[in-house]
């Protein structure tokens, strides 16, 4: 077992009945879409909390590996009838025992349920997720977040929601027979840090270094280009129209999450999707070529969310 640092923050608790307004409509809910309807049954809690991820494990229990915190991510939470995507700050961890303690699923479950209830949480679901749904989990969750996902294929999954005045805290907890897993997500809006590169900046980068990284957003684990990327594609097309002698290789890259063969196919498909958009915009096909490189050419370490985000990229290279 890896050496563990004390990264857990203890939860300061008041009595379970304190701090819950009678009017749940006072909360500024930050979840939209189908998941928003779940909040209607959850009263607002003002129970005192410490810092994220808020909850300490009971005596004798610890993460099996160093937990992971992502400044921004997503997770699919089980409502008992469907999976609902929620975005925000994410914490995930496998849970085991320490100091020779015998793992007891029931004991751990009772402790987790007690602390979440004291924090004003409501249990939304506690049942097996059907195989027809677990089979649809995207690879970035199924593999990239397996330590927080747990054995949802064979064990019941609990979903808890703590509705705060300004945000929600969602908890996915799977108390398995040999170990447990949980994901804690605090909702927050997406803050865009990537910037659209205009044709002039693309030209400057290509002239200076021979390549340019463009901001193209794809559907999760797919090759579909999202509509928000249209201005970036238009900028590349404009660059090619005003520089008729320019020829570009479109190179797709992924992070190390997932199988190598999958990453190779995904990066290749994404590069070709960008090329197809440019051809549709009137660029001659013989001025372009597209190829995927999977995770073989990282520009940052893959041991953090920020590093993985930098490695998931589309590069334009002059040829």
Image (cartoon, helix red, strand yellow):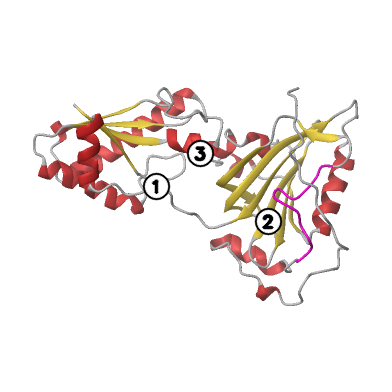
Q: Report the residue at 21% width, 46% height from top.
A: 199
Above or below 100: residue 134: below
Which numbered mark, 1 or 2, is in the foreground of this view? 1
- Residue 271 in percent (x, y) is at 31, 34
Please say whether residue 249 is visible from this viewpoint. no
Pick the front one: 5 or 131: 5
Classify mark 2: residues with Cα within 10 Å, few (<14), some (14-19) or many (20+).
many
Question: Percent position (x, y) of residue 175?
Answer: 79, 40
Local SS, label 1: loop
Circle 3/circle 1 CB separation < 8 Å: no
Distance from disc 3 to disc 1, alpha carbons, whole Å, reads: 12 Å
Quadrant location, the C terminus: top left
Instruction: Name which residue lies at 27% across and 52% down.
Output: 231
First reached walking from the N terminus: tag 3 or tag 1: 1
Is residue 150 left or right of 111 when viewed as pictured? Answer: left
Residue range of the region highlighted in magenta in the rendering? 46-57
Q: Sequence-wise, which precedes: disc 2 or disc 3? A: 2
Residue 204 as seen in the image, left or right of residue 141: left
Looking at the image, residue 216 sits to the left or right of residue 16; the answer is: left
Q: Seen in the image, is 103 located left or right of residue 87? A: right
Q: Earlier in the sequence, mark 1 or mark 2?
A: 2
Q: Which residue is mark 2?
A: 169
**Could you tell me if residue 76 is visible in this image?**
yes
Classify 234 as above or below 253. Answer: below
Q: Which mark is residue 194?
A: 1
- Say the numbered circle drawn on residue 306: 3
Give the camera-side residue of 253 and 214.
214
- At 45% from the left and 23% from the top, the residue drawn is 261
Q: Kindly report the distance in space between the C-alpha atoms of the residues bearing marks 2 and 3.
A: 22 Å
């Amino acid at each position: 077992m890896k050496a563990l640092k004390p990264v857990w923050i203890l939860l300061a608790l008041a009595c379970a009945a304190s701090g819950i307004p009678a009017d749940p409509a006072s909360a500024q809910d930050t979840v939209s879409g189908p998941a928003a309807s779940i909040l209607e049954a959850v009263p607002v809690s003002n129970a005192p909390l410490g810092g994220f991820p808020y909850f300490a494990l009971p005596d004798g229990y610890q993460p099996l590996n160093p937990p992971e915190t992502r400044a921004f991510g997503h997770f699919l939470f089980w409502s008992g009838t469907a999976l609902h995507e929620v975005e925000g700050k994410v914490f995930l961890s496998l849970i085991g025992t320490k100091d020779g303690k015998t793992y007891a699923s029931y004991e751990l479950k009772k402790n987790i349920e007690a602390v979440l209830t004291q924090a004003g949480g409501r249990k939304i679901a506690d049942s097996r997720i059907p195989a027809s749904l677990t089979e649809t989990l995207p690879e970035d969750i199924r593999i990239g977040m397996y330590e927080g996902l747990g054995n949802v294929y064979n064990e019941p999954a609990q979903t808890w929601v703590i509705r705060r005045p300004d945000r929600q805290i969602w908890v996915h907890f799977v108390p398995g027979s040999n170990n447990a897993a949980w994901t804690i997500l605090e909702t927050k809006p997406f803050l865009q840090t990537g910037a659209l590169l205009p044709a002039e900046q693309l030209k400057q980068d290509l002239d200076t270094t021979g390549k340019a990284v463009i901001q193209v957003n794809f559907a999760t684990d797919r090759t579909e280009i999202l509509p928000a990327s249209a201005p970036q594609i238009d900028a590349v097309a404009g660059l090619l129209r005003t520089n008729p002698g320019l020829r570009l290789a479109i190179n797709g890259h992924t992070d190390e999450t997932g199988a190598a063969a999958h990453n190779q196919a995904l990066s290749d498909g994404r590069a070709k999707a960008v090329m197809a958009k440019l051809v549709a915009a009137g660029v001659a096909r013989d001025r372009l070529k597209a190829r995927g490189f999977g995770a073989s050419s990282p520009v940052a370490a893959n041991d953090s969310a920020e590093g993985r985000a930098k490695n998931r990229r589309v590069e334009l290279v002059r040829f």
